[in-house]
Amino acid sequence: MSLAVRVIPCLDVDAGRVVKGVHFENLRDAGDPVELAAEYYRQGADELTFLDVTASSSHRQTMVDVVSRTAEQIFIPLTVGGGVRTPEDVDSLLRCGADKVGVNTAAINDPALISRIADRFGSQVLVLSVDARRERGERHTESGFEVTTMGGRKSTGIDALWWVKRAEELGAGEILLNSMDADGTQDGFDLEMIRAVRSEVSIPIIASGGAGKADDFPPAIAAGADAVLAASIFHYGKVTIGEVKDAIRAAGYDVR
């Protein structure tokens, strides 16, 4: 685990607005991304993550504009993901102010993309976003956790633990582990999933999905997360960055 735990607000952006739902469905407007980013920066966020939840070509320029305007106002690392398919996409986002880039579906379709990005820009730039859930239906994975796409709606049949280990070998610098079972529920992080992934990789894990209160964060760190990420509880003012850091500190962990 890194020396200090990072607290990361996540902003899901659709057509230039922040949205949030449950299990990536029934999305509600949560505000202007640049304004929210500036507020989280003031509150003491260690990093910010933007995810383009539609990632269509029509929204690409909108997202570039959002990233550029945000980078002018905040001075903490900014990760951008959603629809990244090529090293050229990574280059474009880095040039407009992103520090790291998240890759998900394109890496599943072409795992060598991880190596191409890492070789060109460095592993520290590449965050592999993994939307994992407990397996359903007739497909069976060895670990019981499978990788999904399309916001958890499409099963891949890929074992999540095999995938994170393979991604580390290919050059991924971090794993953004999003529990699709817990996403938006505010019932707490999926600690079993975090522990399982921690047992397979040595690179940092960002735990995502399920935070509902400040006390939900320390158990995720105890399970093996190096950073903790949340969205709706920050967007709707349920918990502040400072309250989360106080809870982590009270549990005996170093925070930035």
Image (spheres, rainbow, N blue to C red):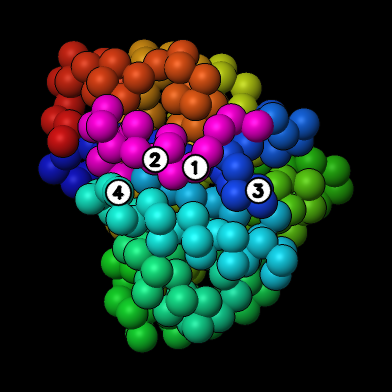
| Residue drawn at 23 percent across, 50 percent down | 75
Q: Nearer the viewer, mark 4 or mark 2?
A: 4
Do tag 4 and tag 2 residues touch (Cβ < 8 Å)? yes
Q: At 30% across and 76% down in the image, what residue appears? A: 122
Determine if residue 34 is in view: yes
Q: Which residue is mark 3?
A: 14
Which numbered dot is residue 205?
A: none
Name the amino acid type tagged 1.
Pro
Q: Around disc 3, counting alpha carbons within 10 Å, would you say few (fewer than 14), some (14 to 19), or many (20 or more)?
A: many
Q: Which residues are magenta?
A: 29-47
What's the distance in space between the residues labelled 1 and 3, CA to CA? 10 Å
Distance (Cα) linking label 4 and label 1: 12 Å
Q: Secondary structure at mark 4?
A: loop
Instruction: State yes or no: discs 1 and 2 in contact (Cβ < 8 Å).
Output: yes
Front-most of 120 and 95? 95
Residue pointed to by mark 4: 73
Q: Identity of the amino acid at label 2?
A: Ala
Q: Earlier in the sequence, mark 1 or mark 3?
A: 3
Query: Would residue 197 be found to the left or right of residue 121 on screen?
Result: right
Q: Earlier in the sequence, mark 4 or mark 3?
A: 3
Residue 119 image-quadrant placement: bottom left
Distance of label 4 from label 2 (alpha carbons)? 8 Å
Of tags 4 and 3, which is closer to the observer? 4
Residue 231 position, x and y percent, is 50, 32
Q: Secondary structure at mark 3?
A: strand
139 lies above or below 108: above
Closer to us: 66 or 1: 66
Reply yes or no: does residue 73 show up in magenta.
Answer: no
Q: CA distance from mark 1 to mark 2?
A: 6 Å
Q: Earlier in the sequence, mark 4 or mark 2?
A: 2
Mark 4 vs 1, N-terminal side: 1
Mark on residue 37? 2
